Image (spheres, coloured by chain):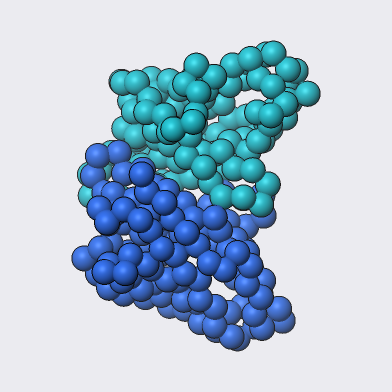
Chain colours: A blue, B cyan
Amino acid sequence: GENVEQHPSTLSVQEGDSAVIKCTYSDSASNYFPWYKQELGKRPQLIIDIRSNVGEKKDQRIAVTLNKTAKHFSLHITETQPEDSAVYFCAAGISGGYNKLIFGAGTRLAVHP
Amino acid sequence: GAVVSQHPSRVICKSGTSVKIECRSLDFQATTMFWYRQFPKKSLMLMATSNEGSKATYEQGVEKDKFLINHASLTLSTLTVTSAHPEDSSFYICSARPTDVLTYEQYFGPGTRLTVT
């Protein structure tokens, strides 16, 4: 089955710096890669996703890149702000059918003012 | 739009009793819902895929007789933890995928914190 590895487990940056979180997946059939942000005690919220027919996607300060050959994808957050502090999860799934997602272990991002 | 609710948000039960958790999609239909378990400061572990009108598909290592799933309608899935034990204490969270085949996204409920004493 699918296995998703996520690094780093914790990340501490200064406000205004960039943050990069990386994930690798094992199942070459996976074609949908969402990123979720989970604040303490709250539900995961989708922040950006990418499908395998696209190499990069950007939404304001957030971007995701996908390298299908290497089976890895990354989340890039620029100009970080304290409110970006949260746990970020990557996931991989196969669209169609049940579309189940397998999640990475999570990255705890701390943005210091 | 795309709101998912869970009930209850917190539940405390005694060892040996059963607990039912409801997951509802409030403003969309969801043929497929998912149940996850999340330990403190850990990731979301997929337990099972709930399919409306058919049996749930359980992930390896998840006891189907322990965690009963019923997806009776396009807006409701329930997870029943049977004969609960302290090791079942955890945060259970569901997600729902809109029936629209063009939608890949899953929307998460707020979660249910189960404590078994």
A18, above or below B46, in the image: below
User: Which one is in front, A90 or B100?
Assistant: A90
B31, above or below A70, in the image: above
Q: Residue at x 31, y 53 (%)?
A: A27
A3, above or below B8, in the image: below
All told, the count of numbered labels is 0
Q: Is residue B4 left or right of residue A29?
A: right
A95, above or below A109, in the image: above
Position of residue B39 measured from the top left corner of the image (x, y, whole percent): 64, 43
User: Which one is in front, B65 or A81?
Assistant: B65
Q: Where does the C terminus of chain B fall, quadrant-wise?
A: top right
Q: Residue at x 37, y 28 (%)?
A: B57
Q: Is residue B45 left or right of residue A26?
A: right
Q: Residue at x 62, y 57 (%)?
A: A39
Image quadrant of residue A87?
A: bottom right
Position of residue A63 measured from the top left corner of the image (x, y, whole percent): 41, 75
User: Which one is in front, B11 or A108?
Assistant: A108
Does residue B27 appear in this view? Answer: no
Q: Residue at x 51, y 82 (%)?
A: A78
Position of residue A46 measured from the top left corner of the image (x, y, whole percent): 45, 57
Q: Is residue A85 left or right of residue A21?
A: right
Position of residue A95 measured from the top left corner of the image (x, y, whole percent): 26, 49
Residue lying furthest right: B117
Q: Is residue A102 left or right of residue A13?
A: left
Does residue A56 appear in this view? Answer: yes
